[in-house]
């Protein structure tokens, strides 16, 4: 394994790294060193964030890798340890790092982040179940992260089951038009497409943990309805989830976000770590990366779904139907379909 650690550090971050990597064969690459070829690598990124959430030397490394192109981290997998002296920035910084390294061809397992914020407050939920000091939980979770990276190998399926989720109008949606181009090239795949209609989905009620477990054990949810009867079973069966996301104010649409929020009831009882996340995102001008980062944060970091390399196909199209005029889009759609079939096998 390769360790890339920021120059700036703290006693907490040092302890996380030392405890988690003890006994492993680790190649440490100091910040500022000329980066070797990091393809075919298992990478640990450990960073101390400043008050604004930045880590300049680590960001420079990320910039160098992205500049090398979309195959710079081919066949590589990475995880992150981030330390902040406040309660801010660990999640947003992680999303940005993951998004950019993913563009360079890096894969991330589900739950690829261990964060240590002020007072270890982010481990208070774990404290209820593990019954030990927050500091100790942080160390154990850091160790588990490295152990997961060490044993991580994507499995292969001959025919992945693909579920595409959207909430768009077929007659006007550039995003659906782009999905159609991709779908036409998914030869031999088992594909289910689900349209999330208005009034069909209510957002998460925010049940207690015990209530959520209770409903989950009954394959149900407080609200029931289409998400319980149709959408959650389809997600549970799928190997690949393709989220078809137009950019609404630099965010996922409310209906698709409601599905993500309601996934908790399924997440409580079902392992998501073998599923793969892909996305098709279209913006009227800019902001595709904002939507991609939101998907990464909610589904990869929080919900434990694997992030294959180059997980998102993006385009810019303002007027209805104009996505077909986006430069090279038909070739990109064909390549993305091949990419899903190659990397979407959990």
Image: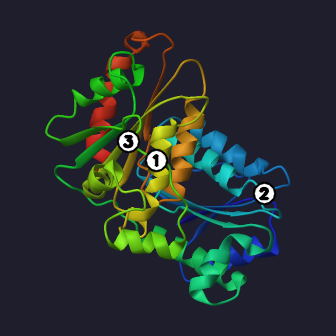
x and y, in percent, of residue 309 in the image: 43, 45
Above-or-below relation of 94 to 278: below
Looking at the image, is mark 3 or mark 2 earlier in the sequence? Answer: 2
Asked if the residue under mark 2 is in contact with the one under mark 3, i.e. CB atoms within 8 Å, the reply is no
Q: Is residue 28 visible?
A: yes
State the mark number for residue 258.
none
138, above or below 262, in the image: below
Residue that badge 3 annotates: 200
Q: Report which residue position mark 1 lands on.
A: 202
In x, y percent, where is residue 237? 25, 56
The mark nearer the N terminus, 2 or 1, is: 2
Residue drawn where x is 18% and y is 41% of the image: 189
Position of residue 317 in the picture relative to residue 128 (left or right): left
> For the residue labelled by badge 2, is the local secondary structure a helix, a strand or a loop?
loop
Of 5 and 144, the residue lying toward us? 144
Q: Position of residue 142 (x, y in %)?
A: 60, 74
Q: Nearer the viewer, residue 330 or 255?
A: 255
Mark 2 vs mark 1: in front: 1
Horizontal relation, residue 313 to residue 92: left or right: left
The reply to whether dot 2 and dot 1 touch (C-beta < 8 Å) is: no
Graded by Cα atoms within 10 Å as few (under 14), some (14 to 19) or many (20 or more), the crowding at tag 2 reads: many
User: Quadrant of residue 173 in the image?
Assistant: top left
Q: Residue at x 34, y 56 (%)?
A: 275
Which residue position is annotated with label 2?
49
Q: Nearer the viewer, residue 142 or 318?
A: 318
The extreme left residue here reads: 188
What residue is shown at x 32% (from left), y 21% (from top)? 170
Q: Residues within 10 Å of mark 1 (few under 14, many from 20)?
A: some
């Amino acid at each position: 394994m390769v360790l890339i650690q920021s120059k700036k550090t703290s006693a907490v971050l040092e302890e996380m790294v030392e405890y988690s990597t003890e006994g492993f064969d680790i190649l440490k690459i100091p910040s500022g060193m000329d980066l070797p070829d990091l393809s075919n690598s298992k990478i640990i990124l450990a960073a101390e964030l400043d008050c604004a959430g930045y880590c300049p030397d680590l960001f420079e490394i990320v910039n160098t890798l992205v500049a090398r192109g979309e195959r710079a981290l081919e066949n590589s997998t990475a995880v992150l340890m981030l330390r902040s002296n406040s309660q801010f920035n660990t999640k947003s910084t992680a999303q940005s790092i993951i998004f950019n390294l993913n563009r360079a061809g890096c894969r991330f397992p589900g739950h690829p982040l261990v964060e240590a914020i002020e007072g270890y407050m982010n481990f208070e939920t774990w404290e209820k179940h593990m019954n030990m000091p927050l500091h100790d939980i942080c160390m154990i979770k850091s160790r588990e992260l490295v152990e997961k990276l060490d044993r991580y190998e994507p499995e292969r399926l001959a025919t992945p089951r693909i579920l595409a989720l959207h909430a768009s109008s077929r007659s006007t949606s550039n995003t659906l038009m782009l999905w159609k181009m991709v779908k036409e090239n998914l030869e031999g795949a088992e594909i289910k497409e689900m349209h999330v209609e208005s009034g069909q989905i209510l957002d998460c009620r925010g049940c207690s943990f015990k209530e959520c477990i209770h409903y989950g054990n009954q394959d149900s949810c407080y609200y029931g309805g289409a998400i319980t009867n149709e959408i959650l079973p389809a997600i549970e069966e799928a190997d690949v989830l393709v989220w078809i996301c137009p950019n609404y104010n630099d965010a996922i649409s409310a209906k698709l976000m409601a599905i993500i929020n309601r996934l908790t009831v399924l997440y409580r009882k079902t392992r998501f770590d073998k599923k793969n996340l892909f996305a098709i995102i279209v913006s009227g001008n800019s902001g595709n990366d904002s939507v991609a980062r939101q998907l990464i944060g909610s589904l990869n970091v929080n919900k434990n779904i694997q992030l294959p390399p180059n997980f998102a196909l993006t385009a810019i199209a303002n007027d209805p139907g104009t996505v077909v005029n986006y430069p090279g889009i038909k070739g990109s759609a064909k390549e993305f379909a091949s990419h899903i079939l190659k990397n979407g096998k959990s």
